[in-house]
Each structure stands twice: as C-alpha cells, then as structure tokens.
Amino acid sequence: MKKVIISILIAILTITIQLNAQPQWKFHVAFEDATGAKDTIWFIWDTTAVFYGIDTALGEGNPNMNYNDFNVYTLTWGNYPNPNIDTTKVVAYSYEYSFGSSIEAINYELPITITWDSALLHADWLPPTPVGWVNYARIDNDYFFFYNNNGLAHQYDMTLSDSVTAPYEGNPDPWAWQDWVHFPMGIYLVQDPTVNVENKIYEAKDSIKTFPNPFKKNTSIEFYLKDKSYVELSVFDFQGKKIRDLISQTLNSGNHIIKWNGLDQAGKPCKPAPYFIYLKVNDTSIQSIKLIKY
C-alpha cells in the first residue's frame, strides 16, 4: 500500500513539475544576401538546455555546412573543462542565462538583410522576472556603430523594428561596403532590469517627445534643456541613414519646439515609414525616439 501511495505522489509531483515548466522560447534571426541566398541562426531558451555542453536534442552542434554556399554560424562549447568547440546554427541555454553570440558568415554578397520577429521579445510565456520581456536586443558590429537606430549605444536596437538592411540602399560610404565591416556580428538578447536607468537620468534634464505621432504632413519635436547647450537634432530612417538635420546650434535652457514637415535634406517628401529622432546635447547622445509617418 505504501508503494502505491508513493508511486501516486511521485506521479502527481512529476505532472506538477511538467505543468509549471517554462515553455520553450525559440527566436530566429534570418539573413539574406544580395543574391537571395538565405540562412538562419536560432536562439532557444529551454529548461533542458545547459550552459556547458552541446544540446544536440535542441539542434546545437555541427550543421554539416556546404562551404561553397552562403552560411551564417556561431560557436558552441562542450563540457567544461574540455570545451570541444563546434560550429552551430542553434544556440540553446536555460532561462537563467542571456544570449551573446558572435555570428560569422561566408560566401555572401552585400547588402545583407536581417529579419526577426520582435513580437517574440514580448512572448507571454517568458519568465516574469527580472523584467518579463527581452528589453535588450541588439546587433553590434563595426557597421552598426555608425549606422544604427540607437545613437546612445551605437548598436542596432532589435526591439524597435523587425528588419534592417546593411548597408542601406545607396549608402555612398565605400567603407560601409567592405565585408569585414559586417562580420563578425554580435547579437545580444537579455532581460536587463537596468537597461533604462541611463535614459531615466537624462529624461530629468534633457528629454524629447513628439506630437502628433504618428503624423501625415507635419510633426513637432519638443525637448527641455536644463542648461544652455549646443544641440543637434536629426532624423534617421530605420536603416541608420540620416534623413535630415533639424537643428545644430546653441540654445538657451528651457523648453524648445522644432517642427519637421516630413521632407528630407533635399526637400523631397519622405515616404510613409518609421523614423527616429536623435537628440545630441553638448556632443553627448541623449535620447532617440520612434516616429511614424503615414
């Protein structure tokens, strides 16, 4: 009788653990080069995954690449202290770890279009702690240091869009078309409770807001300066291309309102699309804000 009761308790405990187990989170970052060749890196949070060791059941390990084709890949490590480093297109960790991978590529032609599903960063089944969503999702390389949608970090912020093409179409900078500028490419996915601390500090003295947003023909950008400062206010598209300089001059402390009529630097109407406003005060990157033109 005792054995039966123990067996039932074990079964109940097993079912409870399975019901409470964190569902798997699977996030893809897809790459397509100028020829239309495609490849994908997968990031997986799974309760069965380990930090050290190659989780073959989750897809980690040698992908048996054809080295004559376009390939993106990263590295995974075996069991410590014998890491047995191997190439992989899948990175799997348990939920207590963050992702930070250096992506390499072979046999590609620029530009590279990178796509992902930003809605998955807010998936309902993500752990409620430390922040409940992936609030730090960045692409980092030499190219995105200069051409990005986050001037504060000099990285491309994946939380603000679902794709980016690098270099952007018509980029006149020869440096931007060099292969080594784009790979290796760092991709970071983190739940970071401190990610907005710096912005909150700045918002107390120098912050921006737009109205209306979204807008059709005209919008106003309002910001407050605590002290007399040299201000640069610019509009960029989501490929990191500067669309227009709105102001570059010294302003007194207080509130300021700058209007943008939706025209680019050449006076041509900008197409309906997301843009971002970038505020720089006394050579310090202060804030960037998303703006929608329809």
Image: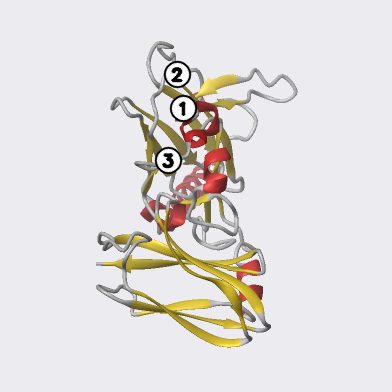
Please give the name of the residue rendered at 46% of the width and 78% of the height, measured from the top-left corner: 209
Circles 2 and 3 in contact, beta carbons < 8 Å: no
Please give the name of the residue rendered at 66% of the width and 64% of the height, measured from the top-left corner: 283
Which dot marks residue 89? 1
Residue 1 visible, this orientation: no
Please give the name of the residue rendered at 40% of the width and 49% of the height, measured from the top-left corner: 239
Circles 1 and 2 in contact, beta carbons < 8 Å: yes
Front residue of 16/126: it is 126
Question: Which is nearer the N-term, disc 1 or disc 2?
Answer: 2
Kindly report which numbered mark, 2 or 3, lies closer to the viewer in this rendering. 3
Instruction: Residue lying at the far right in this picture: please name it.
Output: 81
Give how far across and how far down residue 101 sits, in percent: 57, 36
Q: Is residue 103 above or below residue 288?
A: above
Give how far across and how far down residue 198 sits, in percent: 65, 67
Amino acid of disc 1: Lys
Amino acid of disc 3: Pro
Which dot marks residue 172? 3
Front residue of 188/43: it is 188
Question: Which is nearer the N-term, disc 1 or disc 3?
Answer: 1
